[in-house]
Image: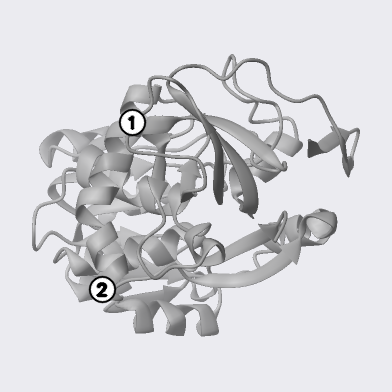
Amino acid sequence: MKAIKITGNSLSWEDCAGFDELPADHVEIDVVWTAVNRADLSQRAGVYPPPPGASDILGLEVSGRIAAVGCAVTGLARGDEVCALLTGGGYATKVVVPAVQVLPIPKGFSLKKAAAIPEVFATAWLNLYQEADLKPGERVLLHAAASGLGTAVIQIATAFGNPVFATAGDAEKLEVCRKLGATGAWNRKDGSFVEAVKNWGCVDMVLDPVGGSYIREDQKVLNADGRIVLIGLMGGRSAEVDLGLMLMKRHRLIGSTLRSRSVEDKGRVMQALYQNVWPLLVAGQIEPLIDSTWSIEEIEEAMAHVAANRNTGKVLLRISE
């Protein structure tokens, strides 16, 4: 097999060792597409190592065709077109993954389109409806809203009756967010979002990949019993929190990651997607937004595109035909 190797500051597409015996509850996938996520950039920079036992190859999601199934796997067969949520290993021609993290691609979808689903839609569902336990009508503030994750969050939340206020740093990106369903929007380059969100009607949940100084601002727009779900640290690891406000309004600050969760947890998230989101995808009510596609040999350019915040939606990497 071939995979992307990290050597110093460089990435190279080269031969590497294959897999040992296939575990009974796993499947092997011939990868056709994978995607660039910010976690890949962080891992490459040495600040987000893979969990113990996980592949050190980059890549948290793939689409492709099943090449082999473990003896305990049911419901999946060799040749099936699938997409999968990974703990690592996606930037390669083959990957081995627990079967519970694998789903058939939505009916009518191409493998290309399906590759844009697993990581962002699983992250969206986990944080909106498991961590924050959103109820119909509760309102969401979403930062970095034009990312692959953000575009998935807007669509899922809107479909399930949760209005979204989106922030981003570009007027064109915000227009995309509005078209996807966001009913409020703010350009972070225009200063603090607080008054704009208050005028919109405040929120019950904030999905925050920024952290840093945003946390204190998030608190100012939260209703009583509001939840801040922190999923990233683009703004820094340290934050000032108003504990008095947290106490009096019963706010909750929740840290959340998907990658380090157990296989069982990830399996539950994927089954929730299959039951609740797959029908919406098949019906065309929501769909993954793809920004651009690159060949795996163009990995440096693709990662630079994401690092510079030039993407609106997912950046995909083609591994094979």
- Residue 192 makes an appearance in the image: no
* Quadrant of the image containing the C terminus: bottom right
Q: Disc 1 marks which residue? A: 74
Q: Position of residue 255 (x, y in %)?
A: 37, 33
Q: Which residue is depicted at the point 85% across and 56% down?
A: 297
Q: Earlier in the sequence, mark 1 or mark 2?
A: 1
Local SS, label 1: loop
On the picture, is 204 further left or further right than 100? left
**Mark 2 Cα shell of 10 Å, populated few (<14), some (14-19), many (≥20):** few
- Picture quadrant of residue 166: bottom left
Q: Position of residue 37 (x, y in %)?
A: 60, 50
On the picture, is 96 further left or further right than 277? right
Q: Tell me the kind of residue under disc 1.
A: Thr
Q: Which residue is depicted at the point 64% across and 61% down?
A: 316
> For residue 283, which numbered disc appears in the image?
2
Tell which of 298 and 232 is nearer to you. Answer: 298
Tell which of 300 and 19 is nearer to you. Answer: 19
Local SS, label 2: helix
On the picture, is 270 further left or further right than 192? left
- Picture quadrant of residue 90: top right
- Residue 102 makes an appearance in the image: yes
> For residue 264, which numbered disc appears in the image?
none
Q: Which residue is depicted at the point 42% across and 67% down?
A: 151
Which colour assignment does the render follow? one colour
Q: Which residue is depicted at the point 32% across and 27% down?
A: 265
On the picture, is 253 further left or further right than 34? left
Q: Tell me the kind of residue under disc 2.
A: Ala
Q: Position of residue 124 (x, y in %)?
A: 35, 51
